[in-house]
Image (cartoon, grey):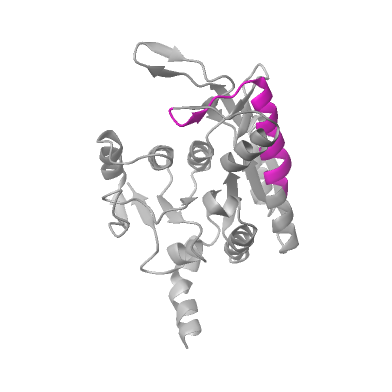
Amino acid sequence: MEKVAAIVEALPYIKEFHGSCMVIKIGGHAMINEEILEKTIRDVLLLYFVGIKPVVVHGGGPEISEKMERLGIKPKFINGLRVTDEETMEVVEMVLDGKINSKIVTTFIRNGGKAVGLSGKDGLLVVARKKKIKREDEFIDLGYVGETEYINPEILRILIDNDFIPVVSPVAADLEGKIYNLNADVVAGNIAAALKAKKLIMMTDVAGILADINNESSLISRMSVKELENMVSEGRLSGGMIPKAEAVIAAIKGGVEKAHIINGSKEHAILMELFTREGTGTMVEL
């Protein structure tokens, strides 16, 4: 009866979400733990088979660093951003486009899904520009680190309309053909806004947005985008949660209905967040 009750509880949500587009950013332990990745992809496929149109965006920072160290290249970061010279960029493309993207696509296929791997370069899906950061009175050159200039979502719409699941890596080019490494959280938020997705789902390794970053029981289940903006400006977020929050803010302001930050290492976190009243992470809305 508990199983039947869960299905009955999910029904109105399935009805509401049927036919809608959702952008899902896979990150955290799901990227390095094969078992978690497999279960995450099965959950995404469940969304697909009940009529939701998922678009997957992935990162791969830990695997990039591991590959660099194996090749004798020491990773270097400034303000949390990877300094990316030409040699590092080759490793980034190798890992993101070659290894991780392919692994996610084949996992979808193995579980009965129709997935297509893309990078931001393909079809000029993501047009990039060089990212500049300022520290004190000088600009710091991070090399081939980029940010989104604009999104051309047509290739995604073609795939979605033909029942494929796009899987996007955050490697993009500018109009001169220079290749850049972009933050996957930000790319996911930009793509969600360009598609006017119903939801943006950000998977990470913490429960969601915490009122007190030192207290895991202080999870904020629901908040407005204005409240999240205040937390960012007041310095109440840290580390990788900052780009996630900025991506969520940009997505909501760009037309996405709601965004969710969830712990992707928690089993069936996506399904619990979308198809139950209580949810499991933080939901952000206008």
251 to the left or right of 82: left
Task: Name, please, the residue furthest toward the top.
Answer: 137
Residue stretch in magenta: 79-102
Q: Which residue is at a point 68% across and 45% down the rendered structure image? A: 100
Going by the picture, which residue comes out furthest to the bottom?
1
141 lies left or right of 156: left
133 and 63: which is toward the camera: 63
Q: Residue at x 38, y 53 (%)?
A: 208
| Residue 147 pos. (x, y %) | 52, 27
Residue 188 lies in magenta, yes or no? no
Instruction: Name the residue nearer the viewer: 56 or 263.
Output: 263
Q: Is residue 32 above or below residue 267?
A: above
Query: In this rendering, does residue 280 appear at all?
Result: yes
Q: Residue at x 72, y 35 (%)?
A: 94
Q: Quadrant of residue 169?
A: top right
| Dominant SS in magenta | helix
- State the image coordinates of residue 175 (x, y, percent, origin top left): 64, 19
- Examine the image and state in which quarter residue 135 appears: top left
Q: Quick check: 282 above or below 241?
A: below
At x 31%, y 37%, the residue is 232
Q: How many marks?
A: 0
Q: Position of residue 59 (x, y in %)?
A: 58, 42
Instruction: For residue 59, say whether it is visible.
Output: no
Foreground pick, 235 / 187: 235
Query: Whole-percent x and y of residue 151?
Result: 56, 32
In the drawing, does residue 116 fall left or right of residue 218? Answer: right
